[in-house]
Amino acid sequence: MKYFFIVVAFLFSFLTKAQETRDYCSFVNPFIGTGSVDSLSLSGSNFPGAVYPFGLVQLSPDTEDSPEDPCSGYDFADSVIFGFSHTHLSGTGVADLFDFLFMPYAGDVQWTAASGSREINGYASTYSHDTEKAKPGYYSVMLTDDNIRAEMTATEHCGMHRYSFNNKGPVNLLIDLNHSLDKKRPYWSCRILDAQVRVVDNHTIEGYRHITGWANTRLVYFRAEFSHPFSSQTIKAGHREYKDAPVANHTNLKMNLVFDNNNNEPLAIRVGLSSVSFEGARKNLEAEIRDFNFDRVVSMADKAWNKELSVIDIAGRDKQMTIFYTSLYHCFIHPSNIADVGGDYININGERRNAPDGKHYSTFSLWDTYRAAHPLYTIIQPDRTTGFINSMLRQYKDYGYLPVWQLWGRETNCMIGNHAIPVIVDAFFKGIPGIDYEAAYEAVKGSSLNPHDNAPYQLLDKYKYFPEDLQSQSVSIGLEIAFNDYCVARMAGKLGRMEDADFFMNRAGYYRNLFDPAIGFFRGRDSKGNWIEPFSPVRYGGNGGYPFTEGNAWQYLWYVPQDVPAFAELLGGDEKFRQKLDEFFTLAARPDDVNGNASGFIGQYAHGNEPSHHIAYLYNYTDQPWKAQEYCHQILNELYNDTPSGYSGNEDCGQMSAWYVFSSMGFYPVNPASGVYSFGSPQLKKASIILPKGKIFEVITHDAGDHRCYIRKILLNGIPYRKNYITHKDIMNGGRIEFFMDSRPVRNASGYEKPPAMVF
């Protein structure tokens, strides 16, 4: 054993030196997930523009004048760019942000966007993918209509533009404070409440806008400084134009700047953003971009991204390398730090506060990311996990419940359950430092007792289920809150709060009241106890008006990750459980009422949305774990690729990517608050996870190939290993797991230990 640790120490030293020279950014393709390449393809709703790890700014092109779908504002299938705005969402199913659109162009002043090329009056431009380039922290494109090269880069709070012109006459820069998501959208409606732009001097402007949308209301400030002076400016406020006006306020506000000198030199623009104040935008800019050296900022972003991506060092085929590191890249875009460099932020009640740790994170897509992204962060981003949770706890202190789907510090109450709870409980049992867990428990408990949108606990306490006639999406909410209650109970028990532990564990069992043994499915009931009719297990529900959320009865049948053996008994025992899984993965009937989240089908399995993500791994609880390996291999190789349509549905702020990162290494957290990772089908020749305190956990896959998806033998630290899972503790201790693959399944798996419910 002594020599083993000497070897591990040597490997760590070797890997550290290798990481300093390896260019991980070169494996990332930011165009993956940005749109369709044909009418049958799907988009992950990702953007290709410049972003800093977990940063406030996402500087990217918008290919729609009023973005709505894709929600990122960019569609690879489009041929026109309307400008470059400074904030975007990565992989979401709802559009928002798009703050402060900048667009350079030549010729006469234009106030409206073109719908095609410059032949149609307007400032938009056609472009070609042949001229686009993107890597982490950098984006460039040639704006064809005026032959302008546009380049973008970013720091944590700032964006930087560089425009190279190929004309000798004056050029214009449009700054549009009215550009936003589709203002005709009937839900989470968008309108500008107020906006201002003002001239500080002939090198500097400032502005803000107060806007509604998915994030309810937001105030966003900017300060822009230019590398050479503008000669004149015109402000358009509504229908009126003001030549050389120094300041204006309006709900429809645009500014046009004219640059008529030095066009033989690129125009560089540094832009600081703040969610707090003009002063915050100025200080962010002073701290992060002090001059107009664009290439230096690109180099800084590249260095930051290489550091983040180096947490897992892998070897595999070129396509695997690209998909893996692009997935890791997407995992590190959100949550986003909305605090200024000094730690000031605006809390959920609109009050100015200061974060003691200097970070206040938001954009918590928790209904998605609690499943795999947050468990992944506990391994490779433990310090940020501390920051995420402390940011969540601030919402509880100010608002009375933990985040559900928080965006730019505002609670959207989008989706169901309260999945900050398993994130906190998982971190508690894993010993993530820097968190007051007594206060965290009070937040977890309070959020499980205080009724809020889609969590009417008073109904659950009265009926012991959620009646569909009193609470829509009742089955999905009941199942997800049952999991949350289980998490609360386990944390309460560990802290010695036994009365609480008993209460929540009892309530966690209420999911059984939604199971109809006559048909073998969970289904809705009304307040009189009657089953909701008619019932079809393939009928799809969206986000209201039906018992199931973004899924159907087949997909939600498997949502008891906290107690799979007990659920198997509900189905009639292990054999019936396995047979039902077989039917699930082979039943080809399509749901009869779907939206864009119903995609990526294998039978009734729909990888395009999160309720299905753990289901293939449930075969590890049967006597046929090789089917988990088979289906995971199929998902990895058929439902991910390295094209713009590389995801089978919305990427969802890192969740779809985290599934790939975990699964390509061969394991996945079925219960994301258990410390247990079930085995699938490892794809990578080698993966070295760089851990705190100089430790490394290596995953070695022998004989992997296109048809060699089945695990024949496992060694853990050189010793034969006969379990269908590995624990968080095993990983964090460092060491090596080796998978030996075969083209034929090992059908006699009776000697392999099935995953436990929890190992802490």
Image: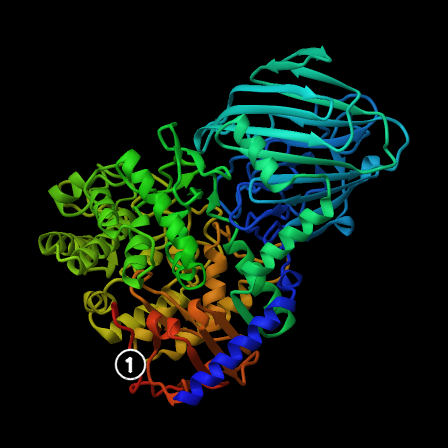
Q: Is residue 52 above or below residue 712?
A: above
On the image, the x and y values in percent for residue 371 come to 37, 57
Q: How many marks?
A: 1
Residue, x 61% and y 49% (percent of image)?
A: 35
Can you give x and y, in whole percent of width and height, for residue 700 in the image? Answer: 50, 80
State the SS at label 1: loop
* Camera-side residue of 299 and 449: 299
Nearest the eye: 354 or 165: 354
Q: Quadrant of residue 176?
A: top right
Residue at the farthest left position: 499
**Circle 1 sits on which residue?**
753
Q: Indicate the quadrant where residue 358 lies.
A: top left
Q: Quadrant of the N terminus?
A: bottom left
Which residue is more in the foreground, 452 or 407?
407
Q: Is residue 641 left or right of residue 543?
A: right
Q: Position of residue 3 (x, y in %)?
A: 44, 89
Pinpoint residue 449: horizontal percent, then vertical percent: 18, 42
Crowding around mark 1 (Cα neighbors within 10 Å: few <14, some 14 to 19, many 20+) is some
Q: Quadrant of the C terminus?
A: bottom left
Q: Is residue 422 left or right of residue 90?
A: left
Is residue 136 visible in the rendered structure shown here?
no
Colouring scheme applied when the structure was drawn? rainbow
Residue at x-position 75% and y-position 26%: 122
- Kind of residue indicated by mark 1: Glu
Residue 371 appears in view: yes
Left or right of residue 174: residue 507? left
Q: In the displayed orientation, state which residue is furthest to the right.
A: 168
